[in-house]
Amino acid sequence: MTNWQTKDQVQAAAKGPLLDALVCSMEHHKQGAECEYEEAVRRMSDGESITGGEGCALCVKYGTAEGSNTKCSLCPLQRCTTSGKGATVWSSLFDAFQAFVADRSRANFDAFQAAERKMVAKLDELIAEEKGKMEATLKRKKINTSDKK
């Protein structure tokens, strides 16, 4: 049984720094990648979100979870394409999810989980990138502080 994120956890991460939202989003998408078929179908039949919460923390942070995509272009996932085809990792996942919602077949579930695994891999890359930026900023601040002494 999957330990689903709560809306409060997602909201808190979305309000924090980008790294918090990335980490929370990765956990959200891991849930989709790792949940059992029967569990996903049951949650959908009960009217629950398949991956808990109200979407990943990035969607909450950039407005897409509220149905307003005015800030979508600011989401780091918008620059992440899949296999050079121009589709974003997010749009590929969304399409796979919608196909599973429309037809809860095992094949559609497997495609959804494959898309979730690609999302997790991309989020792992973005987390490493963001940590690198943070480390570089800290080094610059340390150098600037030592220069003033």
Image (cartoon, helix red, strand yellow):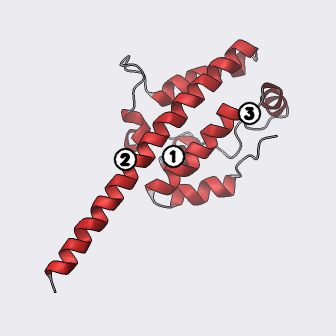
Measured from the top left, where is residue 77 in percent x and y? 43, 37
Q: Name the mark nearer the viewer: 1 or 3.
A: 3
Whether residue 17 is visible here, answered yes or no, is: yes
Measured from the top left, where is residue 142 in percent x and y? 25, 73
Residue furthest out toward the bottom: 149
As shown in the figure, which amino acid type bears the numbered disc 3?
A: Cys
- In the picture shown, does residue 103 fall above or below 125? above
> Residue 129, labelled with which disc?
2
Measured from the top left, where is residue 6 in percent x and y? 71, 52
As shown in the figure, which amino acid type bears the numbered disc 2?
A: Glu
> Residue 58, labelled with which disc?
1
Mark 1 Cα-neighbour bin, 10 Å: few <14, some 14–19, many ≥20: many
Pick whichever of labels 3 and 2 is earlier in the sequence.
3
> Residue 35, labelled with which disc?
3
Which residue is pictured at 80% across the width and 26% down the height? 41
- CA separation, marks 3 and 2? 27 Å
Which residue is pictured at 70% across the width and 20% down the height? 109
- CA separation, marks 1 and 3? 21 Å
Pick whichever of labels 2 and 1 is earlier in the sequence.
1
Q: Quadrant of residue 96?
A: top right
Q: Quadrant of residue 80?
A: top left
- In the picture shown, does residue 117 fall above or below 71? above
As shown in the figure, which amino acid type bears the numbered disc 1?
A: Leu
Which residue is pictured at 74% across the width and 46% down the height? 4
Pick whichever of labels 1 and 3 is earlier in the sequence.
3
